[in-house]
Image (cartoon, grey):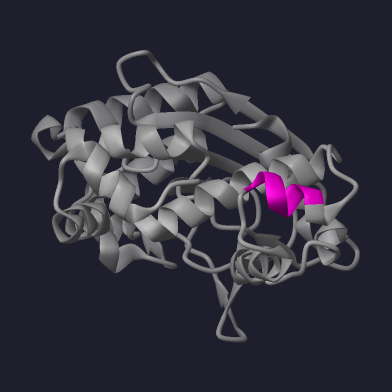
């Protein structure tokens, strides 16, 4: 597998975390991959063969060009041939200024670009597919997003609250978040649901898990008890419960080959 990341133009950097590409030859026996929630939405363009995803045990072929809403649970996918993916990874609240439907309605779904943007979405997919270089793909997408950027939709309160969560690796209660931002808890939860598609508690758990995954992948911890303690889980049972909720696996099972793609993403710290 060849995985590369690219930085966005400074103008869009507050909303876009990075661009990434993934290329891989066809596998004799396709191996399912588990994608772990990371709190970020993705705009995905397949220029290789499509991927199959499993929803409630049923296989569904992903759209060629789509925006994937927030993952609230692990997603199992499988290549159907040669992998060629170009993707835009948005910051946690970064897709809100571009969306045409409620963010919450996109949770755990691959929404086709034509559903979001009509014929303009279809044309964008064709232009990205025809672009000869990654730089051309990036320029095409950035021009498209600039034209549709709704700055009034940017919620500064949500942005500042996410910044707090990232600074403390998600290790903070929602009540404390509410106190620090001087926003009523219920109001904060409504803002997060509409801007991110997750509650503050869900995003906190996701960010904390991201940090834990990076430690596991870098093999900084041999002892899972020490890792759970440093991540401020109540006890190891709580740690294992949260870990399995977001990955579908126990920490010990996490090292398996079926997390190869997540290992690529988390290994870069992107």
| Residue 51 drawn above or below residue 147 | below
**Looking at the picture, how far across and down is residue 116, in whole percent?**
25, 55
Q: Name the foreground residue: 65 vs 184.
A: 184
**Looking at the picture, how far across and down is residue 129, in whole percent?**
50, 40
Q: Name the foreground residue: 9 vs 40.
A: 40
Q: Residue at x 8, y 34 (%)?
A: 152
Question: Is 56 on the left-hand or right-hand side of 231?
Answer: left
* Region rendered in magenta: 226-231
- Residue 35 lies within the magenta run: no
Question: Is 10 on the left-hand or right-hand side of 115?
Answer: right
**Looking at the picture, how far across and down is residue 135, in whole percent?**
52, 19
Question: Is 182 on the left-hand or right-hand side of 207?
Answer: left
Quarter of the N terminus within the rendering: top right
Q: Residue at x 71, y 54 (%)?
A: 228
* Farthest top residue in view: 10
Question: Is 200 on the left-hand or right-hand side of 128?
Answer: left
Q: Residue at x 56, y 48 (%)?
A: 208
Q: Name the foreground residue: 204 vs 5.
A: 204
Count numbered badges in the picture: 0
């Amino acid at each position: 597998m060849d995985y590369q990341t690219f930085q966005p133009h400074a103008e869009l950097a507050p909303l876009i975390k990075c661009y990434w590409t993934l290329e891989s030859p066809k596998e004799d026996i396709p191996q399912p991959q588990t994608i772990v929630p990371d709190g970020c939405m993705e705009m995905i363009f397949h220029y290789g063969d499509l991927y199959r995803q499993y929803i409630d045990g049923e296989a569904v072929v992903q759209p060629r060009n789509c925006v994937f809403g927030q993952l609230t649970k692990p997603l199992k996918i499988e290549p159907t041939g040669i992998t060629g993916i170009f993707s835009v990874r948005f910051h946690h609240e970064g897709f809100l200024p571009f969306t045409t439907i409620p963010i919450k309605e996109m949770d755990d779904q691959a929404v086709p670009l034509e559903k979001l943007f009509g014929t303009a979405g279809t044309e964008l997919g064709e232009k990205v597919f025809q672009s000869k270089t990654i730089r051309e793909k990036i320029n095409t997408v950035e021009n498209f997003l600039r034209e549709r950027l709704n700055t009034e939709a940017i919620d500064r309160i949500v942005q500042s609250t996410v910044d707090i969560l990232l600074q403390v690796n998600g290790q903070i209660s929602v009540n404390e978040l509410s106190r620090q931002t001087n926003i009523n808890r219920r109001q904060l939860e409504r803002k997060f649901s509409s801007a991110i598609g997750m509650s503050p508690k869900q995003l906190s758990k996701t960010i904390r898990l991201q940090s834990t995954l990076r430690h596991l992948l870098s093999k900084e911890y041999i002892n899972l008890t020490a890792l759970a303690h440093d991540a401020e889980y109540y006890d190891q049972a709580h740690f294992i419960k949260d870990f399995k909720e977001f990955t579908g696996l126990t920490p010990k099972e996490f090292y398996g080959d079926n997390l190869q793609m997540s290992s690529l993403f988390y290994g870069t710290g992107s």
